[in-house]
């Protein structure tokens, strides 16, 4: 997938034209995936390029003076768009200048810059000055517009807000069903104090770039290491590295005063230098609370037990998946419907 930044930097539009979807797509959840799938299908029928227009930061930062903590950073969204079959993403900076662009002018610019032949939008899509850009307006302008209905799961609309609430509460299963994939974070591996190495359990410490994570605790999960360009080389396959993930302040070794919450993972059976690489961590099951131990020896012994517990959890999950109960990352959509 190609990513472009700002309209002014775009090359000539593709000869085949594009089918365009517009939105933040935070989380790239089941509702978003329905839009992206419809985009792909429409693009296939037209022989055009499936394209997404998104934003570096959440527009609420400008509109309301504050923004929610994101489920997915821009880098994470780009990776998830790629897995969903989107071929081109245009990333815009939502600022006061863009805020004042009328919906009509915004659409005209997209038609000129992207060769937009059709639009696939969510039922609640709004853009342009005073949020006048709706599917109905585009239809009034005589444009080819497909509207994707709301996705409802167990009687509740799927939304980024609902998923944020579930993640903050530690409801991994509830969030996973709305996402259509396990709760995950993506970050850059940064250097820590190498305590894990001294304890015989080296960890990858992640800078999450503002992404929301589950509550403090120890989790069984999986890790996907992305390539040097921030992409997974085999996006159709599940992550290959089982992991024990710690979210918290590491009370056994923490200094005095408030400590920042860290996210770090020990990848089972893995040994390589991945500093500076991007890693996606998927949270599958909470193993225990984070707690203080009397010594590093006790902490090391507990981590060893966590590793064995994680192996058991992941083995059970693998068995369920092979038995048909788990399915792939899209399996959670089974109980969802378009409202």
Image: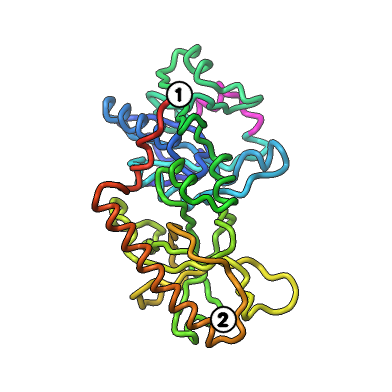
CA distance separating discs 2 and 1: 50 Å
Of labels 2 and 1, the one closer to you: 1
Start and end of the magenta stretch?
A: 99-109
**Could you say whether the residue bearing mark 1 is in a helix, strand or loop?**
loop
| Rendered residue at 55%/56% (across/down) | 214
Pinpoint residue 249: horizontal percent, then vertical percent: 63, 70
Judge the density around disc 1: few (<14), some (14-19), many (≥20) Cα neighbours within 10 Å.
few
Color encoding of the figure: rainbow
| Rendered residue at 62%/49% (across/down) | 69
First along the sequence among labels 2 and 1: 2
Name the disc covering residue 312, or none: none
- Is residue 264 left or right of 254 when viewed as pictured? left
Query: Which residue is disc 1 drawn over?
Result: 339
Please determine whether, in this image, residue 190 is positioned above or below residue 169: below
Q: Magenta residues: mostly which secondary structure? A: helix
Residue 6 visible somewhere in the drawing: no
Query: Which residue is disc 2 drawn over?
Result: 193
Nearer to the camera, 240 or 77: 240
Nearer to the camera, 137 or 16: 137
**Could you say whether the residue bearing mark 2 is in a helix, strand or loop?**
loop
| Rendered residue at 33%/34% (across/down) | 49
């Amino acid at each position: 997938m190609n990513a472009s930044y700002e309209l002014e930097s775009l090359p000539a539009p593709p000869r085949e034209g594009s089918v365009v979807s517009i939105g933040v797509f935070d989380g790239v959840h089941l509702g978003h995936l329905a839009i992206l799938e419809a985009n792909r299908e429409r693009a296939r029928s037209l022989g055009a390029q499936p394209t997404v227009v998104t934003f570096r930061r959440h527009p609420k930062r400008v509109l309301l003076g504050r923004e929610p903590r994101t489920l997915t950073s821009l880098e994470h969204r780009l990776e998830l768009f790629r897995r969903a079959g989107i071929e081109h993403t245009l990333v815009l900076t939502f600022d006061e200048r863009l805020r004042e662009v009328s919906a009509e002018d915004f659409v005209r610019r997209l038609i000129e810059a992207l060769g937009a032949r059709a639009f696939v939008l969510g039922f609640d899509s709004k853009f342009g000055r005073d949020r006048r850009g709706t599917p109905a307006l585009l239809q009034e302008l005589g444009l080819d517009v497909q509207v994707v209905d709301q996705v409802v799961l167990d009687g509740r609309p799927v939304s980024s807000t609902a998923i944020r609430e579930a993640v903050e509460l530690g409801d991994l299963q509830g969030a996973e069903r709305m996402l259509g994939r396990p709760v995950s974070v993506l970050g850059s591996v940064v250097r820590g104090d190498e305590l894990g190495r001294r304890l015989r359990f080296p960890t990858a410490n992640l800078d999450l770039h503002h992404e929301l994570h589950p509550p403090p605790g120890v989790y069984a999960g999986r890790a996907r290491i992305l390539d040097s360009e921030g992409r997974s080389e085999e996006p159709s396959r599940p992550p290959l590295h089982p992991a024990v993930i710690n979210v918290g302040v590491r009370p056994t070794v923490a200094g005095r005063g408030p400590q920042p919450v860290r996210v770090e993972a020990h990848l089972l059976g893995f040994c390589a230098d991945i500093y500076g690489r991007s890693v996606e961590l998927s949270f599958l099951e909470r193993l225990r609370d984070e707690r203080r131990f009397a010594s590093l020896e006790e902490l090391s012994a507990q981590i060893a037990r966590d590793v064995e517990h994680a192996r058991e959890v992941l083995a059970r999950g693998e068995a369920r998946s092979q038995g048909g109960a788990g399915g792939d990352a899209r399996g959670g959509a089974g109980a969802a419907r378009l409202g």
